[in-house]
Amino acid sequence: MGKMSDSANCTIGEGSVFSGRFYVNGSILIEGKFQGDIKTDDQLIVGPTGKVKTDIVARRVTVAGTLIGNIIASEEVTLEQTGKVLGDIATPRLNVEEGVITSGKVTITAGNGAEPVEKLISESFGDDTEGILSNLGKDRKRDREKARTEAAE
């Protein structure tokens, strides 16, 4: 698991339940159940027995347990093989081990959180980007509808 687990500044242990706002100056290890608001300027680790329902804002995030919520990490997100995430992830670096279960939008920010990713890609691509992106969205919607129809038959 994450390197910081042995020296976590704060730990919510296995069998513990916490609900509320939790802002920590340092690293956090969650092995119990947490629901509420959580924020740290360092690393947050959801251990293998951790069950977390919140949006996470941290420098680095490691998920080996279950997380329902979005992740915004300024440096890195690691999803370990036992990790389960339902939510969006925004980070400059994403590490995903085999066995991870996740659903949500992933945005790799390249460390540039100030500019919207869509704008950066559009500017890089050049003219007629809006038309291409619009058609791409329509194609995805059509493919999802086709898959649902085939699954129902």
Image: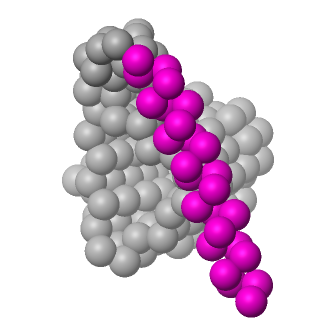
The location of residue 119, given as percent across then percent down, is: 42, 15
Mark yes or no: residue 71 visible. Answer: no
Asked if residue 92 lies left or right of residue 62, the reply is: left
Residue 27 among those drawn in magenta: no
Magenta extent: 128-153
Asked if residue 121 lies left or right of residue 105, the reply is: left
The location of residue 52, given as percent across then percent down, is: 62, 56
Residue depicted at x 29% and y 33% = 92
Rendered image quadrant of residue 36: top right
Q: Is residue 85 above or below residue 109?
A: below
- Residue found farthest to the bottom: 153
Task: State the quadrant of the N terminus.
Answer: bottom left
Asked if residue 39 lies left or right of residue 144, the reply is: left
Rendered image quadrant of residue 12: bottom right
- Give the camera-side residue of 25 and 110: 110
Q: How is the image coloured?
A: one colour
- Give the camera-side residue of 73 and 139: 139
